[in-house]
Image (spheres, rainbow, N blue to C red):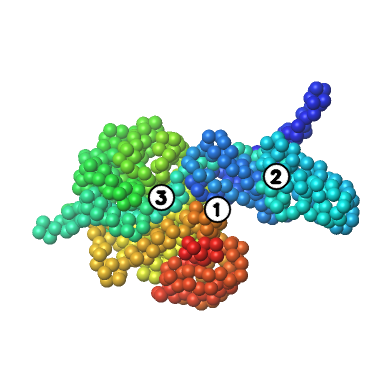
Amino acid sequence: MSQPTDPPRSAASQAAGQRPSPWSAGVGRVPIMGVSPVVDGGRFPARATVGETVPVGANAFREGHDAMGVQVVLTAPDGSEHSRSPLTSTNPGLDLWAGSVRPDAEGPWTFSIEAFSAPYDTWVHNAEIKVPAGIDTDLMLTEGVHVLTRVVEEAEAGARPAADATLARAAIDSLRNHALSPESRLAPAIAADLREVLHQRPLRDGVTVSGPHALVVQRPRALYGSWYEFFPRSEGARFDAQHGGWISGTLRTAAGALDRIAAMGFDVAYLTPIHPIGTTFRKGRNNTLEVHPGDPGSPYAIGSADGGHDAIHPDLGTLEDFDAFVGRARELGLEVALDIALQCSPDHPWVAEHPEWFSVRADGTIAYAENPPKKYQDIYPLSFDADYEGLYAAIRDVLEHWVEHGVTLFRVDNPHTKPVRFWEELLAEFAEKHPEVIFLAEAFTRPTMMHTLGKVGFHQSYTYYTWRHTPEELREYLEELVESSPYMRPSFWPTTHDILTPFMSGGGRRAFTLRAILAATLVPTWGVYSGYELVEDVPRPGAEEQIDNEKYEFRPRDWAGALREGRSLEPLLTRLNTIRRDHPALQQLTDIAFHTADDDQLLVFSKHLAADATGTGAPDTVIVASLTAHDRGSWGTVHLDLGALGVSGEFEVEDLLTGERFTWGEHPYVGLDPDSRPAHILRIIHPEETHHA
């Protein structure tokens, strides 16, 4: 909502009791519309992370032909003005203005948009036309004196630096010097140095303000990170031939996997549920009802006589073992994420203690989970309708328990099957008490629900990336995600323990390579499920999931052997995470730009940050040219928007996958092969950052 700043009333008018300025209500003297980022008209706060470059925009306009300006004012959590910067008119015909802010601390920030008439710019425009043409010359120069006198007065009043007045006085002296030609008198008043001063600190009339608008700033991990998911019971699991059964891995053996995960450059070690598993209707291999002795069951069927969501499966160890796991992760620079599945096995203590927390069918039995034709007889969904407050408190206490033991991220299973009101209240409470804790929504569902979960507080969300493959699909989807970036941050996963698409099961190593490259470079947060590096791509017949699904059985893997034999993608994953960590441009979402190619199956995009946004003092630009199909190569010309890259003419690039260097221009020729060179990931070697190379 635009709020005008009234022009001052004269003492005479105040004494006479005249009515206030007509601009004291409504749209204001200079209307401001369509401000972004504003979520649902301000119902929800926009969100950003520390150091993130946040795009800001508005429609702002005024009547007539006089010049105007727009600024964005960023206010820190303590109420102080953090920064004030101009917006740029990006399409004068549509009155679009754009710029950015960059908050540098966590907390509740605000921003405001200020629009105003710009008398100096109006005068310059008129003077540059009239004075050379000899039209109203003395009048124009006199008006310039009046305009620049305001700069001097503001400096004398302490409203602007004294250096501004020095420039203005010199220009005024020139404007008054009749010994010079009109053009010479004018020159200092329209010179570049004075123009720049009055661009940064303009003279302003009729100031109108839209805001303040809320901007909640969170820690960087809410936007950027690399996740590695694994089942801790599989790490160290072994088959005991003598006794004819499996022996589970433990949290202690799982801690041994952390070194490999950290060495690959991942930031987050994500554990599937570690709680006791029920025995009633326990599922066997591949989600069958045929259970054999030693089948561990699904860790998503949570709860047994050994406890519920706040307990650890006895086979995995104790709470002390979990603390040791978290401690080792921290030593390696890893955060621990825990899968939270708000559902119960029939054996969960809550079933007996709180039957009102479940739905009862007409025959008196508790309803198990179904997604017809799928049936999950080993899982009871929770119902929030009978005792909302009691169930809310129990879930909150579970999360508090794991936060106390070092969990800083939660991957929430199927949040879209719980009331949105519940998430809004729970996430608000955790944002206040534990602002460091991050929630990832595993919500493969309708867009409206996914977006609303983001608006009410989920920091990140799984996405449809898994099913977007062509350049057109990926470009359209990224543009949608950028548009929703003020409230929904995407996480890209090529596969999960539940999902193996036909593209992945039909493309072998080529497909796994391509989808990892794209996931790691298109968005700031990505993840892989354990076994991705071994190209586990065999589907269960009739389903988009792996055969011998790890949800229902132990799956130890020979990581070292695969690496020795050259079968592992570990080197690629390591390289991708290194590239991401070294390049701030890849840690942002909204800095993406798409380019075109003669081959419509080639995806070309770039990410660019200016020098003042990278933290390194040098600009950072990464260009990705990638195949999207695993069964064909591509040879042809790429067409680059050099403005989006921050370059002109020819420039040097380095391929971050191979170390090769090339000279590129606006229309480089690219040759890619799905086996030997599936993609270029190129950094532009900007002249001003050569010493950083």
Q: How far apart are marks 2 and 1 (CA)?
A: 24 Å
Would residue 168 be visible to someone looking at this image?
Answer: yes
Question: Along the polypeptide, which appears first: circle 2 or circle 3?
Answer: 2
Q: Mark 1 points at which residue?
A: 612
- Quarter of the image for residue 291 reads bottom left
Find numbered disc 1 in the image and state the secondary structure of the residue it sits on: helix
User: Looking at numbered disc 3 in the image, what kind of residue is underneath it?
Assistant: Glu
Which residue is outermost to the front?
179
Query: Residue 5: where, in percent of width, then height?
Result: 70, 35
Q: How far across and down, in percent of the image, does residue 296 sit?
A: 22, 52
Going by the numbered disc 2, the residue's amino acid type is Asp
Q: Residue 314 versus residue 513: which sits nearer the camera?
A: 513
User: Which residue position holds label 2?
Assistant: 164
Which residue corresponds to the image point at 87% horizontal and 52% vertical from the top-left? Answer: 179
Name the residue rendered at 48%, 46% in the picture. 50
Q: On the image, numbered disc 3 is attached to which residue?
A: 442
